[in-house]
Amino acid sequence: MAASDEGNSAASDPADRVLVITPVFDAPRELVFKAWTDPIIVGQWWGPTGFTTTTHEMDVRLGGVWRLTMHGPDGRDYKNKIVFLEVARPERLVYKHDPEKGIEPVSFQTTVTFADRGDKTELTMRMLFPSAAAREHVIKTYGAEEGAKQTLARLREHLAKTPIIIERSFNAPIETVWRAITDVGQMKQWYFPALDSFKPEVGFETQFNVRHDEKDYLHIWKVTEVVPGKKLTYNWKYGEYSGDTMVIFELLSEGDKTKLKLTHKGLETFLPETNPELARGNFVQGWTHFSSSLEAFLERTSGDVC
């Protein structure tokens, strides 16, 4: 069955031939798609709990092949061959498990769709088996349903550890943007009004409270790297809720414009009870808001600070 035929017949396929899992991830679609199709990244999460995966070949294109070996916690190896039938970045993947000599003849087709939900991704993983008996065999023999759920749970954990990266260009020279992210008077206007002091000097420390929902949240910053006009790095501890996270501002001149690359690492250090994945989603929203606020500030003050 061609990929397009499989997609068109999805609604009519008997339920006893299909296995569907639909999780939502607190990560943008491009990031989730990359985690699924990058041979280095996929090996960090692919497989049920306790498994590791070795990728021998991965060619993500129409007709491309992904050969991999999954290593079980009991020491047993499971060889897999996957052939891509459709690749639509970053919306959709269709592939079939195409057994070859030396691999148990378990064949089925998987469609993975990545639906953009703003800062989130709704993923639908749909496995279509040639018969109800084949579906039942894979579920009973290999624990396919539970294994798929555990695999996607590992993807969730991986995404929670992935740094947030936001890139944005501003209609302002690099010197102007640098002052906006390092001068406390300017930072208070677009960043944190509660910020009392800041210096772009290695070793400088500051802390301040942000009031939200009738509760104070302590922010503790320590500057660790400064390259004037190019790079600013500081550790950020979010009160008692996290270990040290790292925020990196990198500036690149684009003529009379400036590109800002903002990276936030270490969000996996948030305490389990605070939900690191939720924390990541909140920070994505927060950094998106701050970048917009910085853009508005630069536009508003262009005659004063340029």
Image (cartoon, helix red, strand yellow):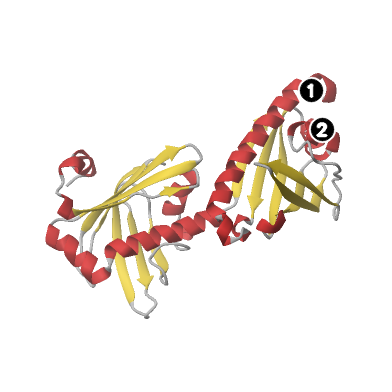
Q: Is residue 225 left or right of residue 4?
A: right
Residue 67, how many percent across, how many down?
34, 63
Residue type pointed to by label 1: Thr
**Residue position marked by numbered label 1 in the rendering:** 301
- Residue extending farthest top: 303
Judge whether residue 203 can be spotted in this image. Answer: yes
Residue for point 17% across, 63% down? 136
Q: Nearer the viewer, residue 111 or 211?
A: 211
- Say few, some or many: other residues with alpha carbon within 10 Å of mark 2 (under 14 / 14 to 19 / 20 or more): some
Residues at circles 1 and 2 in contact by the CB criterion of under 8 Å: yes
Residue type pointed to by label 2: Gln
Residue 238, how many percent across, how many down?
70, 53
Judge whether residue 256 can be spotted in this image. Answer: no
Which quadrant, please, contains the C terminus?
top right
Q: Earlier in the sequence, mark 1 or mark 2?
A: 2
> Which label sits on residue 283?
none
Q: Is residue 223 left or right of residue 7?
A: right
> Which label sits on residue 186?
2
- Say few, some or many: other residues with alpha carbon within 10 Å of mark 1 (under 14 / 14 to 19 / 20 or more): few
- Residue extending farthest bottom: 75
Where disc 1 sits, the SS reads loop
Cα–Cα span, label 1 and label 2:
10 Å
Quarter of the image where one finds residue 161: bottom right
Q: Is residue 87 left or right of residue 300?
A: left
Residue 131, how many percent across, how many down?
12, 57
